[in-house]
Image (cartoon, rainbow, N blue to C red):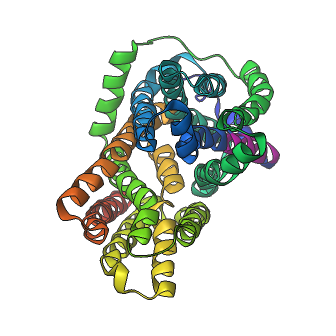
């Protein structure tokens, strides 16, 4: 299906036995991930001053985020067709070009062009993980897959730090939000030459039995639903992404709601993001020893318990509440690398990118639906604490699904 993955056994082994190539590839893929995450979150970090320029309320930034993630959802669905026609490096090259183009359209401050730019950023974000999973799968030894994929996924919170910490300072220093957004294009621009060279050296894909985008998307979804492990991963992606986005979106505002100052709440929010980044790496190490489904199950149960504990948020001492929030960040945002590595372990050879794209479409559904459902529940209940308690359910459901699949896989192996 995809010639650059289905290389000969010798080539595949040689690629995996070259540690220098592994770390260079990991560094480049992490850089791409940072660029994608920072670009997607750029306007949200500068929402008040962007809204002032456009003459709208800051809440309108929510629509821009929706455009990004809806575009990402459909791009992820079409990833199976893309990997049949392009090498992983070619997809990364397209992603970098889309990131640059999207950022250039954002700085026009013309609403129609900003919408188009947001769609381009969403497409770039949606094709990122299927392509990078193909590339990393080729060079990563089986015994270190969860760690390597988790290190790459640490680029997500690092990109958030760039957006939330660096961009406001740049906007102040450069005298405007447009110049700050434009600076985000530097990283994808720097990554273009190396990616282009790697694309030229890559084996051309086999174009036999290529299907249309729609037909391929349906075929990949059918393949996911037929495989019990992939089906479980699709459900986990939806549940865990919903829990993660609600934690990151509402943690700071819930602290302000119970009387914390905005700087103090923001500081704890930043600590939560850092815990997510370090948690991804730590859980990757654990998953390489314990197995991905066991770790994903544990993260679901622990994350659900900690989310439920936030029901008592107003009564908890500051040190205890801070510890709970940081640990919740490590669990609710620390699952992604283990999750992507589990897809790479489970998918058939040559179908890693396609399976990743198909399963990540469910993750995008969780990203889109989770915060909206949280907001609806808050509108009904009027309490962030009750909402966090309700949103412990996705964690517990994920824990049950993960342990169930781990035990069934264990029975099959024995």
Within the image, what quadrant is residue 266 found in?
A: bottom right
- Residue drawn at x 37%, y 49% is 233
Magenta region: which residues? 20-31
Give the answer, above or below, for where 129 lies relative to 272. Answer: above
Which is nearer the eye, 319 or 395? Answer: 319
**Magenta stretch containing residue 357, yes or no?**
no
- Residue drawn at x 46%, y 38% is 356
Q: Is residue 208 left or right of residue 369?
A: right
Give the answer, above or below, for where 372 lies relative to 409. Answer: above
Q: Position of residue 83 (x, y in %)?
A: 52, 23
Total numbered circles:
0
Single out the residue that lies furthest toward the left. Answer: 380
Q: Is residue 116 left or right of residue 32?
A: left
Q: Position of residue 27 (x, y in %)?
A: 74, 45
Q: Position of residue 370 (x, y in %)?
A: 32, 50
Q: Is residue 407 left or right of residue 330?
A: left
- Residue drawn at x 49%, y 59% is 333
Residue 301 visible in the picture: yes
Q: Main secondary structure of the magenta part?
A: helix
- Residue drawn at x 57%, y 32% is 131
Which is nearer the eye, 367 or 6? Answer: 367
Q: Position of residue 189 (x, y in %)?
A: 75, 28
Quadrant holding the C terminus: bottom left
Within the image, what quadrant is residue 30 found in?
A: top right
Give the answer, above or below, for where 353 lies relative to 345. Answer: above
Residue 142 visible in the picture: no
């Amino acid at each position: 299906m995809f010639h650059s993955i289905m290389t000969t056994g010798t080539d595949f082994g040689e690629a995996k036995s070259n540690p220098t190539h592994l770390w260079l590839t990991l560094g480049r893929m992490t850089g791409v991930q940072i660029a994608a995450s920072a670009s997607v979150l750029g306007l949200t970090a500068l929402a008040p001053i962007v809204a002032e320029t456009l003459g709208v309320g800051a809440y309108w930034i929510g629509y821009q985020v929706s455009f990004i993630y809806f575009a990402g959802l459909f791009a992820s669905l079409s990833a199976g067709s893309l990997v049949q026609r392009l090498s992983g490096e070619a997809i990364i090259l397209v992603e970098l070009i889309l990131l640059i183009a999207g950022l250039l359209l954002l700085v026009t401050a013309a609403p129609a062009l900003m919408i188009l730019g947001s769609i381009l950023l969403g497409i770039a974000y949606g094709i990122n993980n299927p392509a990078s999973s193909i590339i990393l799968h080729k060079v990563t030894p089986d015994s270190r897959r969860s760690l390597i994929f988790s290190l790459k996924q640490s680029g997500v919170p690092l990109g958030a730090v760039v957006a939330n910490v660096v961009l406001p300072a740049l906007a102040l220093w450069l005298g405007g939000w447009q110049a700050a957004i434009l600076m985000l294009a530097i990283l994808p621009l720097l990554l273009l030459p190396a990616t282009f060279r790697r694309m030229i050296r890559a084996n051309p894909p086999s174009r036999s039995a290529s299907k249309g985008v729609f037909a391929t998307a349906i075929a990949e979804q059918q393949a996911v639903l037929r495989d019990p492990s992939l089906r479980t991963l699709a459900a986990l992606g939806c549940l865990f992404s919903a829990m993660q986005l609600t934690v990151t979106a509402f943690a700071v505002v819930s602290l302000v709601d119970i009387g914390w100052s905005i700087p103090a709440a923001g500081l704890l929010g930043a600590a939560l993001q850092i815990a997510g980044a370090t948690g991804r790496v730590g859980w990757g190490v654990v998953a390489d020893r314990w197995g991905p489904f066991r770790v994903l199950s544990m993260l679901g149960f622990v994350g659900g318990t900690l989310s439920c504990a936030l029901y008592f948020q107003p009564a908890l001492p500051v040190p205890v509440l801070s510890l709970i929030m940081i640990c919740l960040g490590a669990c609710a945002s620390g699952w992604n690398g283990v999750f992507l590595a589990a897809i790479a372990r489970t998918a058939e050879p040559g179908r890693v990118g396609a399976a990743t794209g198909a399963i990540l479409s469910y993750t995008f559904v969780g990203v889109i639906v989770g915060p909206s459902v949280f907001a609806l529940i808050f509108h009904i209940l009027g309490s962030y604490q009750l909402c966090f308690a309700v949103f412990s359910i996705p964690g517990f459901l994920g824990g049950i699904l993960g342990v169930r699949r781990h035990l069934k896989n264990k029975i099959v192996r024995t």
